[in-house]
Amino acid sequence: MKGSERKRTKILCTLGPSCMKVGTLRDMINVGMDGARLNCSHGDRREHRALVKAVRTAERAAGRPVALVLDLQGAKVRIGEMEEGGAFLKPGQALTITTETVVGNSSRVSTDHASFPSEVEKGETISLADGEIRLRVTGVSKRVVECVVIYGGVLQSHKGINYRRRGKDVRPLTQKDWGDLKFGIEAGADFVAVSFVASGKDIREVRDFLADNGSDIHVIAKVERSEALKNLDGLMTASDGIMVARGDLGLEIPIQDVPLVQKKILSACAASSKLAITATHMLESMIWNPVPTRAEVLDIANAAIDGTDALMLSGETAVGKHPVDAVRTMASVAKRAESICKEDVRLHTDLREDMRITNTVGHAACLVAENLRAEAIIPFTLSGSTARLISKYRPHIRIMAATPEKKVMRRTSLYWGVEPLLVDRANTTDRMIAAIERTMKERKHLRKGDLCVITAGVPLFVRGRTNLIKVHRIGSGNWDLL
């Protein structure tokens, strides 16, 4: 996919049975997949290892980097295994939820949350599967909750249970999560998404664990609790990005408030240079159907116009019938939406509130590239932070992040508009430019005579020291220092 053809909003796809084959994953990458989400709520360690291996093989086959996002289950209460993967619940029928280990069916299902019966009351409403199914509690005993189905539907294995009495004292991470996080470190995950966080403290605990285990995996806070909205500023400060997890969030707050909250979070991420991911029910109908609804198309377009870095597909790619078509559809809708975002509103904003050197250099690089009508902005980066700052301003000029670090190349593949490039390590600025040109020539990204704007730090290989801009014409051997 050429730079002029590539959409700039990224797509994060959930892994699962529908995309376990390398060929399917390769096709998904070729039509627009930029990141792979490993959902720890489903599957076991053996399946997770197989999925990671398949993603890396497909990545090499497609010739494009893919970010791996480990999504922790968190303290969410879930249904256990179901016969044949799921059962249909009819309105008015009785349903028993037990803490015993049983394979569920249309009359009885299980949960491994031992204290569940003590946390609900007779007459209370319980939601299953992101609110698609509603129950009313008719009786409670030591290990069993008896219910009647209010709104029915298909209940699949491991779907979530939401109910009123799970309060503010719920810890977001369980022993399973810490074990999954350790697996993510070993598997080379690029991001970890932390579920059911309430404040920045929850994120800092994860960061401390990662640091103790020698990892610099970036941390994404999933906003799906009302407490998280109240502490949004703290979460923004502590994390590297925010996921708007609209499924559980829509059960925590009035559903009519979800669009406004989404816009608020995307705006806050833009102001703070944080990664923003919009998730849940984006192409839900394509789990079964080959084409989306008009409302789903509008949802994708609105999120892209509002400035999300990435759009996430869940069941559409994990268990859906049309995983490749779902990615292709999302990519085409996002690209079309981007075509109306021609005014660089962020680029022409007042910078006086953030005068950090790196931020100012990134902003200036965008303005220089725009004024010179350059073909590309090329941030040379060791951590990805400069690429992220340039991405923040949403220039319509290509952003091609050059890095000698493979993990940074993968990480930046989720940043809006960033095309990652793996280049040879160099010890001088001249050799760095030569390495960039060499890669450009090999990949046919730019042609001889094309003008580009390069940002870097002097001395090289010192993190957080982006302090210069170079205007360079490909193949000229000459460059200007600004």
Image (cartoon, grey):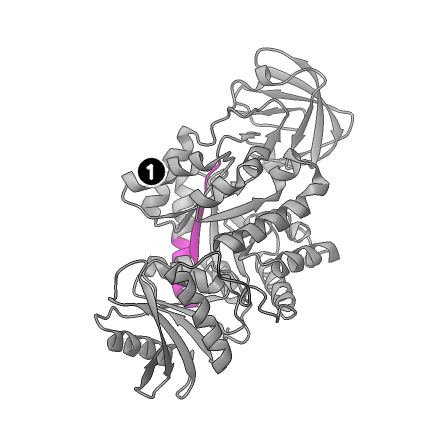
Residue lying at 75% horizontally and 24% vertically, measured from the top left: 93
Task: Determine if the magenta segment contains residue 68.
Answer: yes
- x, y (%) of residue 220? 46, 46
Residue 305 at x, y = what percent? 63, 61
Q: From the viewer's perspective, is 234 left or right of 251?
A: left
Q: Circle 1 is placed at which residue position?
A: 208
Helix, strand or loop status at disc 1 = helix
Residue at x 25%, y 63% (from the top left corner): 461
Q: Is 318 on the left or on the right of 151, as rendered?
A: left
The amino acid type, in three-letter code, at marker 1 is Asp
Residue 10 position, x and y percent, is 52, 60
Q: Which of the pair 144/390 is nearer the observer?
A: 390
Is residue 207 highlighted in magenta?
A: no
Residue situated in front as seen by the camera: 130 or 318? 130
Q: Is residue 268 above or below residue 40?
A: below
Which region of the structure is painted magenta?
Answer: 53-73
Place of residue 7 in the rendered image (x, y in percent of width and height, measured from the top left) = 56, 67
Q: Residue at x 66, y 69 (%)?
A: 340
Vertical relation: 304 (above or below) 182: below
Q: Is residue 364 above or below residue 12?
A: below
Relative to residue 165, is residue 468 drawn left or right?
Answer: left
Can you see residue 65? no
Camera sees residue 349: yes
